[in-house]
Amino acid sequence: MHTVSSICPFCGVGCGMGLRVEDNRVVAVEPVPNHPVSQGKLCAKGWNTAFGVDPEQRITQPLKRLGHDFVPVSWAEALDDIAEQLRDILANEGSQTVGVISCARATNEDNYALQKFARAVLQTHNIDHCARICHSPSVAGLAQTLGSGAMTNSMTDVDHADLIVIWGADVTENHAILGGRIIQAKLKGAKLIVVDPRSTRLAKLADLHLPLHLGSNIALANGLLHIIFREGWQASSFLAERVEGLDSLQAHVTAWTPERVQRETGITPELLYRFAQMYAHSPAAMLCYGMGITQFACGTNNVIALSNLVLVCGQIGRAGTGINPLRGQNNVQGACDMGCLPNVYSGYQSVNDAEVRAKFANAWQVPQSEQQGMTSLAMMHAARDGAMRAMIIAGEDPALTDPDQTEVVNALKKLDLLVVLEMHLTATAQLADYVLPVASFAEKDGTFSNCERRVQRVRKAIEPPNSCLSDWQISGELARRLGNDGLSWQTSEQVFSEMAALTPIFSGMTYDLLAQNQGLQWPCHDQAPLGTPILHQQTFPLQANGKARVIALESAEPAEMPDAEYPLAFTTQRLHFHYGCGSMTRCAPVLERETPLGLLLMNPSDAQQYGLSQHEPVRVSSRRGQVDTRVEITADLPVGVVSMPYHFNEAPCNRLTNTAQDPITKMPELKACAVRVERRVSP
Amino acid sequence: MLSLLPEMAHLIDRYPDGADALHLRFRLANGVRWQAQSGQFFMLSVMGIGEAAFTFVSLPNIDGEFSALVRKVGHLTAALFELPVGSVVGVRGALGQAWPTLENKSVLVIAGGCGLAPLASWLDLRLQQENQQTVLLYSVKNNDSQILAQERLAWQRQDLTMLMVEDDPTWHSAEQLAQATGKRLDAALALLPEPPQAVLTCGPEAMMLAVGDMLRQRGVAPEQIYLSLERRMHCGIGLCGHCYLGSSLVCKEGTVLNLSRVHELCSQQLPSATAWQHC
Amino acid sequence: MNQHSFYLADLQPLRQHLAQWGQLHEPRFEPDGVLRWIEAAVEDAFQWTDGVPLTSLKPFFFAERETVFVFDGQHFRSQLPSAPKRVFLGVKACDAAALAIQDRFFAEDSYYQSRRQAALVVAVDCRHPCAKGFCPLTQSGPCVREGADLVLTPAPQGWYLQVVTEQGQTALIGLSLTASDDMTVNQHRQETEQQCLAEFADLSTLATGMARLQAGQVSAQEWETLAVQCLSCSGCVNLCPTCSCFTTFDVTHADKTIVRERVWDSCLYDGFQREASDHNPTATAGARSARYWFHKFSPAFIPTQGRLGCTGCGRCDGVCPTIIGARSVLTRLAHA
């Protein structure tokens, strides 16, 4: 048995993980004691990784749909068929009728290849991935205020912070090892403030917990700013030097008096004052946030609201500070970095910039489309309306994880061609015309980028089962058949090198340098050859004068508030033991066993009102659909709010969620809608 | 060496027992025969699903046949409900400690719901002996959920003194339930000339512990009160660790344990056994 | 006749001889900087390494995941592991003590014994405290007490070797050794231990915490508060050299054979004791944490286990993401 050094395939923390290999099988994993991020720890998901890549549970041969069934076919047949159909659709319907959804958990190399396939082979910018429904508001919001959408600091800044603010994130459940570091920091004397309607684990340990009304984040932020300006606590010299827009923001927030804020958020003036005081006065305050900020119809503005607060108090550009979106997936940062977004190429180089398009056209020897690309949700709507004919979906499960699930399923069924690249037969894979089996992270070389922009090496530990290929290899095979040899790389390192040469923020990285330094944080180039742990130390990339911007915002309510017909607020959450759609974690017996019997979490007082006892069967309904499950009574939920984890295909909570969208990013409002709950006769 | 390898057995009969229980009868294959005592249990494997512990309702006979009672509560029992007669299953047994025979001692048997099942074979054997003073107190949630009707009829024909009681659906609070339990106990005790020399009880854990406490208050020594504890089990032979109670393993030292030992094990971790509301 | 103690000027002849018995495994720092058990080449000299390897000996004998039996639709066939002969050279006292617990616990488990009986354990006394360990508290070191076939102690020049078991005795046959006086070696080992103990940092806070726990003075509320931090990641259970719980699960293969596997399990999971009826004897995180540490530090287990469940190796402290490993817990309990 030997150990192969790699990175955990689950969340965006990117813990070091040793794969214990015997007889071409990953039999176990071990933690990496000297890893800069994980420091010798793993969470329950990480510890159970081996089950998730177990060949027994996987698709290992290409599958072709025949009626309601799948039949195994050879790679040659599958790839030839798919290429032929794509050729026909491109010729007859045009490039705008095809789209690619790439995978936030596949490697950077896979993602670069998939977006190159879209742009250089299909000649479309219809490329997107699940960041759309996750942190697209972070990218868009911070792009407007700072000029860059990534975590500004590093996870190690938790050790240097005097105050840690967790806003709309359940860190110990989804970024467990980071959550652990936050607890460690707290034990060493850091203060902790948690803003969350739910009583999360960190909320229970915090110095201050602000259980605000679901979706009232902007009002809270404006209220904090109101007090900070009123008391003169803003970081005046920092602002004078580095920030624009202060006057209009200051004038704007005078309307958010503590009384108004209490009405809108439920937070008392005393608690608000304390928060403002602590945050403004802290020598180093680090703000981290998650889906509780982004997954709203005003998600982009929510992010801007936090950015305003951070800038006004000068809590950025130094150790122990920053505004830190916690990217959820192991490589969602990477998928964004690689340009798997309709409006940017790799490294956030804009599709709308003619010079950028020319650069890629030249490098790839293929003219670049000038037509706007579609987001994943736009692609779903186009599919529903018959305007999208073919999609390639790599390693994502929109049929389970996207809002308004029924519509998604209908849309995908309407496609002429749906090709799914997958390890397991997910809900989405079950709708495919072709399922192509892909190698797991343990079966290929490549890189992942964690939430702190650290690009880390992932190493092949075992041979893929049967004939599974990497996503970048599949891209090459299809490209060749469609007349483009530019994707026929032989190694993942070749993919990375090509990408780095075209991407300024990655230009200083090589596989060797990544190995020597246990990863490097972009931007990594001539001016920062060892990467950049802390962004914006001197200037912001927003504009030529290097200044950031604060922007005045109106507060907003969720698009669908509780009413007489649907009297409860509904939100979604994660559980520690499961990941995403559960395709990997539910393969582990001890994790599957932890799946609660009741998936509708409800406050005891609400439960009493509805006459429900623990684990009674219930039906949850919204205007979009209904889900049958059991109730899980917990005081962690506030009165009037119910919640469901989204990992379980037998209780798909996205049947209920709303598609009301953030106008800028099209982020759907997954975190808030209205439902009613009824007792159900025993199944 | 201890073995995790099952013996082959076949499901030879099945019939409903009560509104939601199923009586399953098995026969060991390959000439394998078990000796088992009342109160012991066996591990049953439905391959592809898993393995769990079940008590013998009827003990293995010379033909290697035995039975168990099953309610649909999880994946394994759901699979058992669908299992056709003739199916191959895996079994390991007989495991655990038996009920004491208590010959010539007056015994009060208290069964709650499906807790009657592990006591059935003890009552069968008891009633075959002469002049044994026995009273059965059998409580059920409602009449639909009563089990072993045929067996009870046979026992009554053998002159078993039995008191059967049904829960009142309006009882919700712990106090109501406790009060009712006390009344029923007193009614059962009234059927014996003196406090019983031993008590056997089986049912929900909270019920057994509550009944045990009440009996102690009424003068029965905790060493003479025997419980059959239920635990999640993955091996039944003291290896997997799931069935722990204090420093002991229920599959090896139990499932039958006397109340004094149960209290001792419960209080090993904490000064007071009632600090957590369960055992 | 059975000579018990020997002197070695150099370890190499012993290593060469034992390498004939089985594949040498020794703790080494690998290129990634992590201390692991590796298959050592005899030509590479033995390296003393401070502290314990990342994983204990546990996974070598109690496999993290293994097949128990195979079912083909009719028959159940046991599948015992084939275990190559291995020599573990350089086992520290704490890990040897833990091995003794597992040896007792799995004495009748054929899967464990298949591997265990093919192994020779050569432990080494520690001369100085390691950074993480607290073996004096749990009486599992620094001097090797049990769990080993052979014990090495650094001597003023060279090493002393003592034979503990018959397997150890047999393994030495054919090796020419310089006999040493038992009393002298015993005394030397005692002195070595005394010197080492004197160098240990103050463990009295940990002792106070352990005493409170053993006296049953820790309240349920204290445990519930502490356990808010427990993620049930179960890293502690995985790396603890004495943890032995497992669960079984069935895997149906494409060819329809069904394999029953057993895999490591952890009593910190809610589902560990939860029954199908939903009754859970340890329904709260506090109850489960209490039980875990009870098993590590309570003398109630000594009759069956032979010693306390914790051997003071310190791995749980290193692997716990939320800082509630043994040292942290005992320190916290001491201050209540």
Image (cartoon, grey):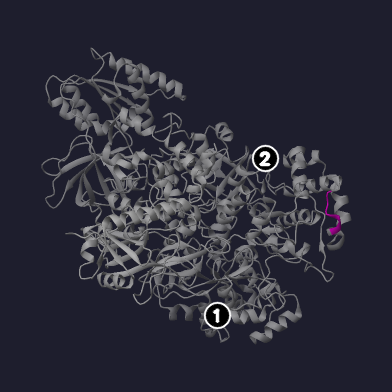
Q: Is residue A91 visible?
A: no
Is A409 or C235 nearer to us in this picture?
Answer: C235
Task: Report how far apart the C-alphas of labels 1 and 2 lie in the structure.
Answer: 55 Å
Q: Is residue C335 visible?
A: yes
* Residue A291 lies within the magenta run: no
Q: Which of label 1 and label 2 is nearer to you?
A: 1
Q: Determine the image quadrant of residue B107.
A: top left
Q: Determine the image quadrant of residue C273.
A: top left
The subunit letter for the residue under badge 2 reads A
Are dots 1 and 2 on a single chain? yes
State the residue at coordinates (48%, 74%): A444
Q: Dot 2 lies on which element?
A: loop
Q: Dot 1 lies on which element?
A: helix
From the top left corner, tell me how far across and down residue A410 is, in percent: 55, 60
State the residue at coordinates (19%, 36%): B58
Residue type, label 1: Glu
When the figure is inspected, residue C235 is found, relative to residue C137, above or below; the finding is below
* Magenta residues, start to end: A233-237
From the top left corner, tell me how far across and down residue A592 is, in percent: 43, 52
From the top left corner, tell me how far across and down residue B265 is, in percent: 35, 34
Is A230 or B28 nearer to us in this picture?
Answer: A230
The subunit letter for the residue under badge 1 reads A
Pointer 1 or 2: first along the chain: 1
Q: Looking at the rendered structure, which numbered label has been put on residue A493?
A: 1
Left or right: B208 in relation to A655: left
Helix, strand or loop: magenta stretch: loop
Residue type, label 2: Asp
Mark 1 residue crowding within 10 angstroms, few (<14) / some (14–19) / many (20+): some
Residue hosting label 2: A563
* Residue A236 lies within the magenta run: yes
Q: State yes or no: discs 1 and 2 in contact (Cβ < 8 Å).
A: no
